[in-house]
Every structure is written in C-alpha cells, then in structure tokens.
Image (cartoon, rainbow, N blue to C red):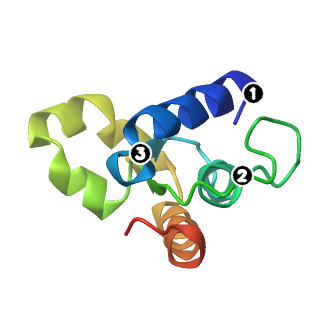
C-alpha cells in the first residue's frame, strides 16, 4: 500500500473511527493483498509509511471474497469484477485475507 493511501486510511480512521471503516483491496495476488491487509490492520510491516507501528485493527476484504460479493448487486459484480475473479487464485486470496482478519482485526 503506497504512502498516500496509508495517510488516507489513517486520517479517515481518526475522523470516523475504526469501527466504521472497511478497507477493500483488489490486488491480483494473495501475498500483495495480504500485505495491504496487514498494513491497515496491524501496521505497515515494511515500516515505510504513516502506518508503521500503527495497528488500526481495521476490517479488510478483497473484492473476490464471498462476503463482499454477497454485498454487491449481482449486475455490478458481473460487470466490474467477475472477469478478474476468473483469472485469480481466489482460494489463496480468501485464505490469506481470512488469516489476516482473524489475527489482527479488532472490529469483526
């Protein structure tokens, strides 16, 4: 997650409260998605940004996870995400995101 997005997430969390924030990621690989998820939930593991050492505990989902898919109108999901879902390793992404949420998210 780039430094600008870290700043945005931190600022919004301070303004609205972590219990009111859900972060949505769309990285193509489980490892990249997991890094972004860990950054907003446990702090930036690379210690490079404003979230270094700042465990926000935020809920974070990937766009191909069943929880998100169920919350989006079927037509919108089909138009915007379904093609991506066909080429990604969805099982690995879901596994990685679930592990991060279970380990670090305090607003489940």
- Residue 46 x %, y %: 88, 49
Q: Which residue is mark 2?
A: 54
Determine crowd level at label 1: few under 14, some 14-19, many 20+ residues with C-alpha closer than 10 A: few
**Horizontal arrangement in the rendering, residue 44 relative to residue 89 (left or right):** right
Residue 107 higher or lower than 88, as above or below: below
- Secondary element under disc 2, as helix, strand or loop, is loop
Tell whether label 1 touches label 2 (CB within 8 Å). Answer: no
Residue 53 higher or lower than 72, as above or below: below
Q: Residue, x 33% and y 37% (percent of image)?
A: 81
Structural distance between the alpha carbons of marks 3 and 2: 14 Å
Which image quarter holds the N terminus?
Answer: top right
Which image quarter holds the C terminus?
Answer: bottom left
- Residue 88 x %, y %: 51, 51
Question: Quadrant of the rendered structure where residue 27 is?
Answer: top right
Nearest-to-viewer mark from 3 and 1: 3
- Secondary element under disc 1, as helix, strand or loop, is helix
- Secondary element under disc 3, as helix, strand or loop, is loop
Instruction: Report how many numbered discs are placed on residues in the image.
Output: 3
Q: If you read the primary sequence from the N terminus, does the residue marked by circle 2 or circle 1 appear first?
A: 1
Of residue 94 and residue 56, the one placed in the foreground of this image is 56
Structural distance between the alpha carbons of marks 2 and 1: 13 Å
- Residue 65 x %, y %: 37, 59
Residue 90 higher or lower than 72, as above or below: below
Q: Which mark is residue 3?
A: 1
């Amino acid at each position: 997650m780039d430094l600008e997005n870290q700043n945005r997430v931190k600022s919004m969390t301070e303004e609205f409260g972590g219990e009111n924030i859900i972060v949505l990621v769309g990285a193509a690989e489980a490892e990249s998605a997991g890094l972004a998820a860990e950054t907003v939930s446990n702090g930036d593991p690379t210690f490079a940004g404003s979230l270094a050492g700042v465990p926000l505990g935020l809920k974070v989902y990937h766009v191909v996870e069943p929880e998100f898919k169920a919350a989006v109108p079927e037509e919108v999901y089909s138009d915007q995400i379904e093609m991506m879902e066909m080429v990604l390793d969805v099982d690995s992404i879901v596994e990685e995101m679930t592990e991060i949420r279970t380990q670090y998210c305090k607003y489940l």
